[in-house]
Image: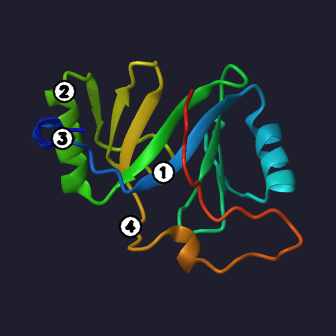
Amino acid sequence: MSDTMSSARRGARDQRRLVAVERAGYLALHADDPVAAARFAAHHLGLAHVHTDADGRTYLAAHGPDPYSLVYSPGPHGQVDHFSYLVRDLDALERAAQALEDAGAGVERIDRSQLWRGQPAVRVTSPAGHVVQLTVGVHVPVPVAAQTASPAAEAIAPLALDHIAPY
């Protein structure tokens, strides 16, 4: 690539305001029977059931610092409700909302999420139709796996939601 082309691309990229995502937060999926789905994830995937709320959402945690990594909500079985990415703090959340609005995205600001341990959040729908929620979570200076003791080796035991790749 020529120096002129590379410089032009760098300049265009520098003019965009990017959202400063720290890492994946949690995945919320619909299930006809959230309790059965959660039981399967706990017994076969090594997640721990940590809460069920009054609306029937069931929360499961991996073995890292996050309060939950997977949420099953009542709804059409097999569909994604939303996925969450974490930002550093409330200032980063506001900057993210502004950057998304400046880019023309429809942003929903949520003062307190209705999910368990609800916090302020920002929701946006991607061009592919996926609902993305940005929220403040546990900030870690190094990858979660590098600072979490591994659970017993005889079972599957995920440390944290590592990444989300919607299709």
- Separation of disc 4 and disc 2 at Cα? 26 Å
Tag 4 near tag 2, CB within 8 Å: no
Q: Quadrant of the C terminus?
A: top right
Task: Read off the residue under disc 3.
Answer: 6
Q: Residue at x 55, y 32 (%)?
A: 166
Q: Nearer the viewer, residue 16 or 147?
A: 16
Task: Read off the residue under disc 2.
Answer: 103
The x and y percentages for residue 139 are 38, 67
- Separation of disc 4 and disc 3 at Cα? 34 Å
Task: Read off the residue under disc 4.
Answer: 139
Q: Quadrant of the N terminus?
A: top left
Describe the element under mark 1 as helix, strand or loop.
Answer: strand
How packed mark 1 is, by other alpha carbons closer than 10 Å (few <14, some 14-19, many 20 or more), is some
Left or right: 146 with respect to 76?
left
State which mark lies toward you, 4 or 3. 3
The x and y percentages for residue 164 are 54, 42
The x and y percentages for residue 55 are 60, 35
Tell which circle, 3 or 1, labels the residue nearer the N-terminal end: 3
Tell which circle, 4 or 1, labels the residue nearer the N-terminal end: 1
- Separation of disc 3 and disc 1 at Cα? 30 Å
Left or right: 42 with respect to 139?
right
Tell which circle, 4 or 2, labels the residue nearer the N-terminal end: 2
Q: List the single residue furthest toward the front.
A: 2
